Structure formats: structure tokens, C-alpha cells
């Protein structure tokens, strides 16, 4: 994925979100498709669904945007996305 290891950036994203948003306690484990190329540039984005509604959909989705290089990924943005 643009040279970035998907599991590595997913793990970094999850650690950052757990630190920044301590009230969210139920992030879904890594799944294929959670890491995808950035629309602009050479970075990647990571989505982390959390919680579960009665119909099985996630309560929300958090995202991390990564820049930097595959050897030294940098989180340039974290926050929620509209679902």
C-alpha cells in the first residue's frame, strides 16, 4: 500500500486513537481494506470502525492519515469520519 506495511500503520493508528480518544473502548481488529492509499500524495489512510449498533453497523469510524515514508510513517491527521 504505497510501500507502507498495512498492519504496522493500523497498529500505530490504533495506539494513537486509544491515547487521544480514551472514551472509545471497542475498536474492531484489523481487517483487509482498513488501509488504503491517500487520495493525494504517497501516504495511506487507516480506518478504524468502533462500537456496534443493534443492526451490526459500527457506531462510528475514526481515521488516521499517514505521510512520511514507509520506513518512518508519520500520523498527519486523526479524527472521526461521517458514517
Image (spheres, rainbow, N blue to C red):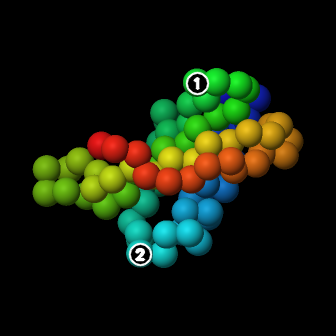
Residue in front for this viewpoint, 74 or 35: 74
- Quarter that holds the C terminus: top left
Residue at the spot of label 2: 23
On the question of residue 18 being in view, the answer is: yes
Residue 71, image quadrant: top right
Residue drawn at (58%, 71%), measured in percent from left and top?
Answer: 19
Residue in front for this viewpoint, 1 or 83: 83
Q: What numbered label is drawn on residue 28?
A: none
Residue lying furthest right in this view? 71
- Looking at the image, residue 2 sits to the left or right of residue 68; the answer is left
Q: CA distance from mark 2 to mark 1?
A: 29 Å
Q: Residues within 10 Å of mark 2 (few under 14, many from 20)?
A: few
Q: Position of residue 41 (x, y in %)?
A: 70, 25
Q: Position of residue 1 (x, y in %)?
A: 67, 28
Pointers 2 and 1 in contact (CB under 8 A)? no
First along the sequence among labels 2 and 1: 2
Residue lying furthest bottom in this view? 22
**Marker count (numbered):** 2
Q: Residues within 10 Å of mark 1 (few under 14, many from 20)?
A: few
Residue lying furthest left in this view? 54
Residue drawn at (73%, 26%), measured in percent from left and top?
Answer: 42
Residue drawn at (29%, 51%), measured in percent from left and top?
Answer: 58
Q: Is residue 78 above or below residue 1?
A: below
Residue in front for this viewpoint, 52 or 79: 79
Residue 39, image quadrant: top right
Q: Is residue 4 above or below residue 81?
A: above
On the question of residue 7 being in view, the answer is: no
Residue at the spot of label 1: 39
Identify the element where label 1 is drawn: loop
Identify the element where label 2 is drawn: loop
Amino acid at each position: 500500500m504505497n510501500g507502507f506495511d498495512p498492519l504496522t500503520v493500523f497498529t500505530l493508528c490504533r495506539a494513537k486513537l486509544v491515547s487521544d480518544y480514551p472514551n472509545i473502548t471497542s475498536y474492531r481488529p484489523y481487517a483487509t481494506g482498513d488501509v488504503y492509499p491517500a487520495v493525494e500524495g504517497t501516504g495511506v489512510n487507516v480506518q478504524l470502525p468502533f462500537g456496534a449498533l443493534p443492526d451490526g453497523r459500527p457506531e462510528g469510524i475514526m481515521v488516521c492519515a499517514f505521510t512520511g515514508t514507509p520506513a518512518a510513517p508519520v500520523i498527519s491527521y486523526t479524527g472521526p469520519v461521517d458514517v
